[in-house]
């Protein structure tokens, strides 16, 4: 068994709140929570000290949090903003120590062997790092140094808890004492790491607690072979963490040199979505190659070169194996941070011309299971590849899937989601008063096609402010209709919509009409919209 | 070693048992007939087309004037594919497809990709790329598709066992051949009385004519009733 590398973890607690306050200084000194979608709806993922003082805790539902704390400001979680704000901290720490690894926005780690010799010991290093981050007006920052990332993270948490009593903001666990430091911790601290790598972390720690193994010390005393036999790979990982060992044994096979994936961007990408689209291709290729070799990687190095020859590089770590979507999210955050903070820091002066993804910290691929029920994964793969190729030809926005976003007219209801971006599935839409009745039209014109709705005398039909038509409509002429339109068979409406009732110009009236189109009552169903005195056909029920 | 040397002289009394075993194995083996691999069409559309199925690797033509229901028929074909858990894609030349109507006839929107605003010059390349990956491609035909491109797309569909549905809704003509043509002749909206608040467009009757080669040589005409 290999003892873990001496590591320092730097943690800024409640980073989403800190990032939101940096963006909007008005939020300082008010109770703020950041919420995200959980299994039971929206739950608090991060809360400010003011909110915590009122009894708001992480994991609480939004409604309960609002009930406990009056005047609470609720913000949606946005990882990209957090990552962008954290980039400043990363840059400051980067000036002092090399080989930074970002765990997530708000937390990073680095090996301390070299830096602590340079700065005169672990204590001096931790104090130096904390002081350096404090200079950036980040008040709450903690450092922990121990053997291994897991123990260092726990040490940083200890620093947090003992801060108010003893004023310590760094905890250094002396070399060789990590096992003793870990022993009193409850087994529940293992849940997150096991969850990320294998899933089922909470079930595992529940089971351990019911078996009477309540602390990491008690769990670590079990023989490793027995733990593997009883709990499988997740148990073995938890056991290694509890013993203060590395998360996985270094692999015996030497990985091929050229595992990195690179792409030249011509013209250089100046927008995040352009670069992220290229990164998605790289990530898919990289993970497919690792897959073929039976490897998974826990860290990935994102490198970019700009047109002016600037070289940027960052390492991201993920507990457990990186999946394509997790990898793309990290690359996107990083590109976002580089490109959008460019104006303030001056580190990037041109578009990104080359993007490289290099895997690091390779381990054997374990614990992946293809879906058993529900869809043919090979078919989904095949479709994904074909659609990605079309995206490559026509641009990422050309290939879309649709979703019902709610609204009154067909154009308002359709939301196009570019292929590969997350579809926020809406389970049930609230009712929309005033929505156009009847079936959805198969042809929707955006912008609507100009048309003429006329009465029996041939004069255009107008709709008054009260929604009364000037005359019953009798004919519709429009270029989108066969033979340019014709007399009406039937009509209904008008339905008046006040888009903004305080703004008289934003009113519209909608008609459903059937234009004569053949024998025995056949006709063309159309949705006609009248807005600002202009008539147009918005949809044809083809 | 001794046992193997004596094997030919072992009594073969179990021949009968073996024959029985073979018979059972043949009965239990998954036999996939062309009929079973075809995409079944549900409802009245299924009664109109030969065998009630669409053979994989075939090309279908959907025609009809705007408003006669050709787009709805195309969506119904796509729905038959997504109902099997497979993928469908649409090539939307001028970005006018209304996906909510597709959802109304049963298309699973998360497995229905739409490629919007395809330049006519790249139309054939895009359709060919889609045929590689999805089970059904619903493609509107732009003007000026070359016969050679049409032939290549037919071959590609046959080779990849995907269904290509070409929709002649823009007035353009598909120069290639098709297994059969679904022609939306007309669509009648059941009169609900003018001016009611529920709208005039409710239940609908689509008149469809099917004509083609082979089993579909005799034209069939039918009506599809669609509730509002």
Image: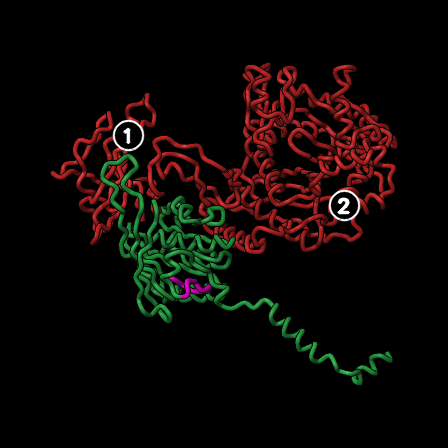
Chain colours: A red, B green
Start and end of the magenta stretch? B51-60
What is the x, y in percent for residue A235?
78, 42
Whichever of labels 1 and 2 marks the residue nearer the N terminus, that label is 2
- Mark 2 lies on a secondary structure that is helix
Q: Estimate how packed mark 1 is, as few (under 14), some (14 to 19) or many (20 or more) residues with alpha carbons within 10 Å.
A: many
Q: Residue at x 48, y 58 (%)?
A: B135
- Mark 1 lies on a secondary structure that is strand
Q: Residue at x 54, y 42 (%)?
A: A275
- Horizontal placement of A358 versus B12: left or right? left
Q: Nearer the viewer, residue A275 or B70?
A: B70
Find residue A33 and report its image quarter: top right
Examine the rendering and report whether any part of residue A344 can be seen: yes
State the residue position of label 2: A233
Q: Is B179 above or below relative to A187?
A: below
Examine the rendering and report whether any part of residue B122 can be seen: no
Report the quarter where the C terminus of chain B lies: top left
State the residue position of label 1: A496
Q: Are marks 1 and 2 on the same chain?
A: yes
Whether residue A147 is in magenta: the answer is no
Q: How many marks?
A: 2
Find residue B143 and report its image quarter: bottom left
- Horizontal placement of A234 versus B128: left or right? right
What is the x, y in percent for residue A22?
58, 22
């Amino acid at each position: 068994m290999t003892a873990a590398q001496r590591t320092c973890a730097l943690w800024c607690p409640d980073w989403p709140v800190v990032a939101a306050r940096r963006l909007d200084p008005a939020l300082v000194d008010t109770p703020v929570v950041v919420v995200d979608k959980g299994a039971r709806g929206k739950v608090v993922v991060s809360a400010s000290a003011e909110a915590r003082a009122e009894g708001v805790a992480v994991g609480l539902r939004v409604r309960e949090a609002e009930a406990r704390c009056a005047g609470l400001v609720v913000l949606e979680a946005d990882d990209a903003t957090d990552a962008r704000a954290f980039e400043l901290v990363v840059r400051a720490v980067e000036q002092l120590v090399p080989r930074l690894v970002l765990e997530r926005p708000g937390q990073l780690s680095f090996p301390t062997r070299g830096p602590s010799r340079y700065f005169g010991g672990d204590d001096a290093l931790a104090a130096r790092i904390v002081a350096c981050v404090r200079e950036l007006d980040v008040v709450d920052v903690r450092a922990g140094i121990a053997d291994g990332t897991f123990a260092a993270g726990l040490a940083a948490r200890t620093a947090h808890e003992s801060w108010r009593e003893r004023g310590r903001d760094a905890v250094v666990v002396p070399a060789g004492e990590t096992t003793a430091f870990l022993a009193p911790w409850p087994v529940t601290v293992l849940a997150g790491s096991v969850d990320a790598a294998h899933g089922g972390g909470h079930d595992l720690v529940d089971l351990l607690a019911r078996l009477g193994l309540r602390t990491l010390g008690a769990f670590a005393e079990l023989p490793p072979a027995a733990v593997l036999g009883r709990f499988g790979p997740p148990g073995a990982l938890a056991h290694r963490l509890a013993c203060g060992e590395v998360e996985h044994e270094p692999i015996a096979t030497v990985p091929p040199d050229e595992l990195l994936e690179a792409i030249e961007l011509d013209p250089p990408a100046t927008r995040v979505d352009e670069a992220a689209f290229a990164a998605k291709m790289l990530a898919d290729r990289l993970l497919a190659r690792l897959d073929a070799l039976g490897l998974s990687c826990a860290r990935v190095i994102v490198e970019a070169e700009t047109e002016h020859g600037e070289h940027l590089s960052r390492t991201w770590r993920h507990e457990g194996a990186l999946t394509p979507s997790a990898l793309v999210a990290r690359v996107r955050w990083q590109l976002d941070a580089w490109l959008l903070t460019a104006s303030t820091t001056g580190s990037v002066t041109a578009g990104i011309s080359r993007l490289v993804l290099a895997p690091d910290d390779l381990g054997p691929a374990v614990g992946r299971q293809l879906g058993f029920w529900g869809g043919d994964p090979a078919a989904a793969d095949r479709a994904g590849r074909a659609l990605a190729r079309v995206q490559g030809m026509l641009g990422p926005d050309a290939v879309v899937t649709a979703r019902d976003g709610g609204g009154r007219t067909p154009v308002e209801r359709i939301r196009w989601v570019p292929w590969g971006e997350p579809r926020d599935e809406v389970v049930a839409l609230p009712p929309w008063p005033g929505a156009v009745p009847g079936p959805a039209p198969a042809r929707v014109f955006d912008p609507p096609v100009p048309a003429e709705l006329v009465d029996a005398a041939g004069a255009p039909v107008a709709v008054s402010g009260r929604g009364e038509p000037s005359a019953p409509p009798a004919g519709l002429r429009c270029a989108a209709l066969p033979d340019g339109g014709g007399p009406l068979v039937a009509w209904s409406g008008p339905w008046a919509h006040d888009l903004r009732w305080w703004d008289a110009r934003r009113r519209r009236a909608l008609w459903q009409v059937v234009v004569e189109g053949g024998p025995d009552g056949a006709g063309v169903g159309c949705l006609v919209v009248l807005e600002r005195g202009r008539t147009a056909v918005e949809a044809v029920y083809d | 070693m001794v046992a193997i040397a004596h094997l030919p002289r072992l009594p073969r009394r179990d021949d009968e048992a073996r024959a029985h075993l073979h018979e059972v194995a043949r009965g239990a083996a998954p036999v996939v007939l062309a009929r079973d691999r075809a995409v079944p069409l549900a409802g009245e559309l299924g009664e109109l087309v030969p065998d009630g199925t669409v053979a994989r690797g075939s090309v279908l033509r959907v025609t009809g004037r705007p408003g006669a229901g050709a787009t709805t028929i195309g969506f119904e074909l796509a729905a038959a594919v997504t109902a099997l858990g497979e993928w469908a894609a649409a090539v939307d030349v001028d970005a006018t497809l209304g996906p909510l109507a597709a959802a109304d006839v049963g298309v699973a929107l998360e497995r229905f990709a739409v490629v919007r605003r395809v330049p006519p010059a790249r139309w054939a390349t895009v359709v060919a790329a889609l045929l590689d990956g999805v089970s059904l491609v619903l493609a509107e035909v732009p003007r000026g598709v070359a016969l050679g491109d049409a032939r290549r797309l037919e071959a590609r569909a046959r080779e990849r066992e995907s269904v290509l549905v070409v929709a002649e809704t823009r007035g353009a003509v598909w120069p290639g051949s098709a297994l059969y043509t679904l022609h939306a002749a007309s669509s009648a909206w059941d009169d609900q009385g003018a001016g009611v608040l529920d709208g005039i467009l409710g239940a609908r009757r689509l008149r469809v004519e099917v004509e083609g080669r082979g089993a579909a040589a005799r034209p069939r005409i039918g009506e599809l009733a669609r509730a509002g």
